[in-house]
Image (cartoon, rainbow, N blue to C red):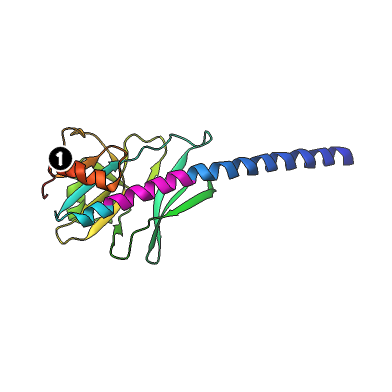
Protein backbone atom coordinates (compact mmCIF):
# COMPACT_ATOMS: atom_id res chain seq x y z
CA UNK A 1 0.00 0.00 0.00
CA UNK A 2 2.81 2.35 0.91
CA UNK A 3 4.54 1.53 -2.37
CA UNK A 4 1.35 2.29 -4.30
CA UNK A 5 0.92 5.64 -2.58
CA UNK A 6 4.55 6.48 -3.23
CA UNK A 7 4.15 5.61 -6.91
CA UNK A 8 1.04 7.78 -7.20
CA UNK A 9 2.89 10.67 -5.54
CA UNK A 10 5.86 10.34 -7.91
CA UNK A 11 3.65 10.13 -11.00
CA UNK A 12 1.59 13.13 -9.88
CA UNK A 13 4.77 15.11 -9.21
CA UNK A 14 6.06 14.40 -12.71
CA UNK A 15 2.73 15.38 -14.26
CA UNK A 16 2.66 18.67 -12.33
CA UNK A 17 6.30 19.34 -13.18
CA UNK A 18 5.65 18.72 -16.86
CA UNK A 19 2.58 20.95 -16.78
CA UNK A 20 4.54 23.71 -15.06
CA UNK A 21 7.29 23.52 -17.66
CA UNK A 22 4.71 23.64 -20.45
CA UNK A 23 3.10 26.74 -18.97
CA UNK A 24 6.51 28.41 -18.64
CA UNK A 25 6.99 27.82 -22.37
CA UNK A 26 3.55 29.23 -23.15
CA UNK A 27 4.08 32.55 -21.37
CA UNK A 28 6.72 33.91 -23.80
CA UNK A 29 4.32 33.23 -26.67
CA UNK A 30 1.50 35.02 -24.85
CA UNK A 31 3.86 37.92 -24.14
CA UNK A 32 4.69 38.17 -27.83
CA UNK A 33 0.97 38.59 -28.59
CA UNK A 34 0.60 41.17 -25.80
CA UNK A 35 3.60 43.22 -26.92
CA UNK A 36 2.48 43.14 -30.55
CA UNK A 37 -1.00 44.35 -29.60
CA UNK A 38 0.39 47.08 -27.33
CA UNK A 39 2.81 48.25 -30.02
CA UNK A 40 -0.01 48.43 -32.57
CA UNK A 41 -2.08 50.58 -30.22
CA UNK A 42 0.87 52.93 -29.64
CA UNK A 43 1.33 53.27 -33.42
CA UNK A 44 -2.32 54.24 -33.87
CA UNK A 45 -2.28 56.77 -31.03
CA UNK A 46 0.98 58.26 -32.34
CA UNK A 47 -0.52 58.64 -35.79
CA UNK A 48 -3.70 60.19 -34.39
CA UNK A 49 -1.61 62.72 -32.46
CA UNK A 50 0.55 63.57 -35.46
CA UNK A 51 -2.29 64.30 -37.87
CA UNK A 52 -4.39 67.45 -37.73
CA UNK A 53 -7.53 65.68 -38.93
CA UNK A 54 -10.28 65.43 -36.36
CA UNK A 55 -12.51 63.58 -35.99
CA UNK A 56 -10.42 60.65 -37.20
CA UNK A 57 -10.93 56.88 -37.10
CA UNK A 58 -8.05 54.40 -37.42
CA UNK A 59 -8.50 50.63 -37.49
CA UNK A 60 -5.77 47.98 -37.60
CA UNK A 61 -6.42 44.28 -38.03
CA UNK A 62 -4.40 42.10 -35.65
CA UNK A 63 -2.51 39.15 -37.06
CA UNK A 64 -2.53 36.76 -34.12
CA UNK A 65 -2.34 32.95 -33.97
CA UNK A 66 -5.54 30.96 -33.42
CA UNK A 67 -3.98 29.26 -30.40
CA UNK A 68 -0.82 28.97 -28.31
CA UNK A 69 0.40 25.45 -27.56
CA UNK A 70 -3.00 24.26 -28.82
CA UNK A 71 -4.77 26.36 -26.19
CA UNK A 72 -7.07 29.30 -26.76
CA UNK A 73 -6.17 32.68 -25.31
CA UNK A 74 -7.91 35.96 -24.54
CA UNK A 75 -6.79 39.57 -24.98
CA UNK A 76 -8.10 42.53 -23.00
CA UNK A 77 -7.02 46.04 -22.06
CA UNK A 78 -6.52 47.01 -18.43
CA UNK A 79 -5.40 50.10 -16.57
CA UNK A 80 -3.74 50.72 -13.23
CA UNK A 81 -3.75 54.37 -12.30
CA UNK A 82 -2.41 56.30 -15.28
CA UNK A 83 -0.83 53.22 -16.86
CA UNK A 84 -2.52 50.99 -19.44
CA UNK A 85 -1.67 47.40 -20.30
CA UNK A 86 -2.55 44.66 -22.74
CA UNK A 87 -3.30 41.48 -20.79
CA UNK A 88 -3.22 38.10 -22.50
CA UNK A 89 -4.16 34.89 -20.72
CA UNK A 90 -5.18 31.32 -21.46
CA UNK A 91 -8.95 31.33 -21.78
CA UNK A 92 -9.55 28.23 -19.67
CA UNK A 93 -6.55 28.69 -17.39
CA UNK A 94 -6.67 32.36 -16.44
CA UNK A 95 -3.76 32.31 -13.93
CA UNK A 96 -1.44 31.75 -16.89
CA UNK A 97 -1.33 35.40 -17.92
CA UNK A 98 1.08 38.11 -19.04
CA UNK A 99 0.86 41.88 -19.40
CA UNK A 100 2.58 44.31 -21.75
CA UNK A 101 2.52 48.07 -21.08
CA UNK A 102 1.01 50.42 -23.63
CA UNK A 103 3.96 52.80 -23.69
CA UNK A 104 2.48 56.17 -24.55
CA UNK A 105 4.78 59.12 -23.95
CA UNK A 106 3.95 61.94 -21.56
CA UNK A 107 2.31 64.05 -24.27
CA UNK A 108 -0.02 61.27 -25.38
CA UNK A 109 -3.28 60.44 -23.65
CA UNK A 110 -5.93 57.92 -24.61
CA UNK A 111 -9.10 56.65 -22.99
CA UNK A 112 -9.72 52.89 -23.05
CA UNK A 113 -13.22 51.94 -24.17
CA UNK A 114 -14.24 48.41 -23.20
CA UNK A 115 -17.80 48.20 -24.53
CA UNK A 116 -20.37 49.90 -26.72
CA UNK A 117 -22.23 51.00 -23.59
CA UNK A 118 -19.15 52.79 -22.25
CA UNK A 119 -18.35 54.56 -25.52
CA UNK A 120 -19.66 58.01 -26.29
CA UNK A 121 -22.39 58.28 -28.95
CA UNK A 122 -19.86 59.98 -31.21
CA UNK A 123 -17.34 57.12 -30.94
CA UNK A 124 -20.07 54.51 -31.40
CA UNK A 125 -21.28 56.32 -34.50
CA UNK A 126 -17.86 56.44 -36.15
CA UNK A 127 -17.10 52.79 -35.45
CA UNK A 128 -20.52 51.44 -36.41
CA UNK A 129 -20.30 53.31 -39.72
CA UNK A 130 -17.02 51.48 -40.34
CA UNK A 131 -18.47 48.07 -39.41
CA UNK A 132 -16.36 47.79 -36.27
CA UNK A 133 -17.98 46.18 -33.23
CA UNK A 134 -16.42 47.17 -29.89
CA UNK A 135 -15.31 44.20 -27.77
CA UNK A 136 -14.25 44.04 -24.13
CA UNK A 137 -12.06 41.03 -24.92
CA UNK A 138 -10.77 39.31 -28.04
CA UNK A 139 -10.70 35.53 -28.18
CA UNK A 140 -8.11 33.78 -30.31
CA UNK A 141 -9.67 32.31 -33.42
CA UNK A 142 -12.02 35.26 -34.04
CA UNK A 143 -12.13 36.47 -37.63
CA UNK A 144 -10.87 40.02 -38.24
CA UNK A 145 -9.86 41.05 -34.70
CA UNK A 146 -8.86 44.70 -34.64
CA UNK A 147 -7.58 47.47 -32.45
CA UNK A 148 -9.08 50.86 -33.14
CA UNK A 149 -8.38 54.48 -32.31
CA UNK A 150 -10.86 57.34 -32.60
CA UNK A 151 -10.02 61.02 -32.23
CA UNK A 152 -13.31 62.81 -31.68
CA UNK A 153 -14.33 66.31 -32.71
CA UNK A 154 -12.77 67.73 -29.53
CA UNK A 155 -9.44 66.01 -30.12
CA UNK A 156 -9.93 63.41 -27.36
CA UNK A 157 -8.43 60.03 -28.29
CA UNK A 158 -10.15 56.73 -27.50
CA UNK A 159 -8.72 53.24 -28.01
CA UNK A 160 -10.14 49.77 -27.77
CA UNK A 161 -10.50 46.27 -29.14
CA UNK A 162 -13.06 45.14 -31.66
CA UNK A 163 -14.06 42.97 -34.58
CA UNK A 164 -14.44 44.12 -38.14
CA UNK A 165 -17.79 42.70 -39.25
CA UNK A 166 -17.48 43.23 -42.99
CA UNK A 167 -18.85 45.68 -45.48
CA UNK A 168 -16.48 48.05 -47.23
CA UNK A 169 -13.23 46.26 -47.99
CA UNK A 170 -9.85 47.58 -46.95
CA UNK A 171 -8.86 48.45 -50.51
CA UNK A 172 -12.14 50.29 -51.14
CA UNK A 173 -11.90 52.46 -48.04
CA UNK A 174 -10.32 55.77 -49.01
CA UNK A 175 -12.06 58.16 -46.67
CA UNK A 176 -12.83 59.13 -44.05
CA UNK A 177 -11.24 56.18 -42.23
CA UNK A 178 -7.96 54.31 -42.62
CA UNK A 179 -7.95 50.55 -42.33
CA UNK A 180 -4.30 49.82 -41.67
CA UNK A 181 -3.98 46.32 -43.04
CA UNK A 182 -0.29 45.74 -43.37
CA UNK A 183 2.54 45.22 -40.91
CA UNK A 184 4.06 48.70 -41.00
CA UNK A 185 5.72 51.24 -38.77
CA UNK A 186 4.38 54.68 -37.92
CA UNK A 187 6.21 56.45 -40.75
CA UNK A 188 4.77 53.95 -43.23
CA UNK A 189 1.33 54.42 -41.69
CA UNK A 190 1.67 58.12 -42.40
CA UNK A 191 2.64 57.44 -46.00
CA UNK A 192 -0.37 55.15 -46.37
CA UNK A 193 -2.62 57.83 -44.91
CA UNK A 194 -1.23 60.36 -47.38
CA UNK A 195 -1.90 58.01 -50.29
CA UNK A 196 -5.53 57.31 -49.42
CA UNK A 197 -6.18 60.93 -48.50
CA UNK A 198 -7.97 60.48 -45.21
CA UNK A 199 -10.61 63.16 -44.82
CA UNK A 200 -12.28 64.49 -41.73
CA UNK A 201 -15.29 62.49 -40.59
Residue 37 is one of the magenta-drawn residues: yes
Instruction: Give me the residue at 73% from left, 40% from top.
Output: 14
Instruction: Give me the residue at 16% from left, 37% from top.
Output: 173
Residue 96 is one of the magenta-drawn residues: no
Point out residue 120 in the picture as x, y percentages from the top left corner: 21, 57
Point out residue 111 in the picture as x, y percentages from the top left corner: 29, 59
Residue 154 vertical placement versus 194 (above, below): below
Report helix, strand or loop for mark 1: helix
Magenta segment main secondary structure: helix
Give the camera-side residue of 12 and 21: 21
Q: How many marks?
A: 1
Residue most toward the right?
2
Q: Name the residue under label 1.
A: 195
**On the picture, is 62 further left or further right than 179?**
right
* Magenta-colored span: 31-44
**On the picture, is 23 further left or further right than 162?**
right
Give the camera-side residue of 192 and 82: 192
Amino acid sequence: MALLMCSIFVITSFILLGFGIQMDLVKPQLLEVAEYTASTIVDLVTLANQTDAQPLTLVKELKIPPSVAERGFTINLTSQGKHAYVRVYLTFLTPVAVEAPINLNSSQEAIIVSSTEKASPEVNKYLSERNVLIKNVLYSGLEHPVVWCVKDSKGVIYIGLGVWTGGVSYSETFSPVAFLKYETKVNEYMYYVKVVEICML
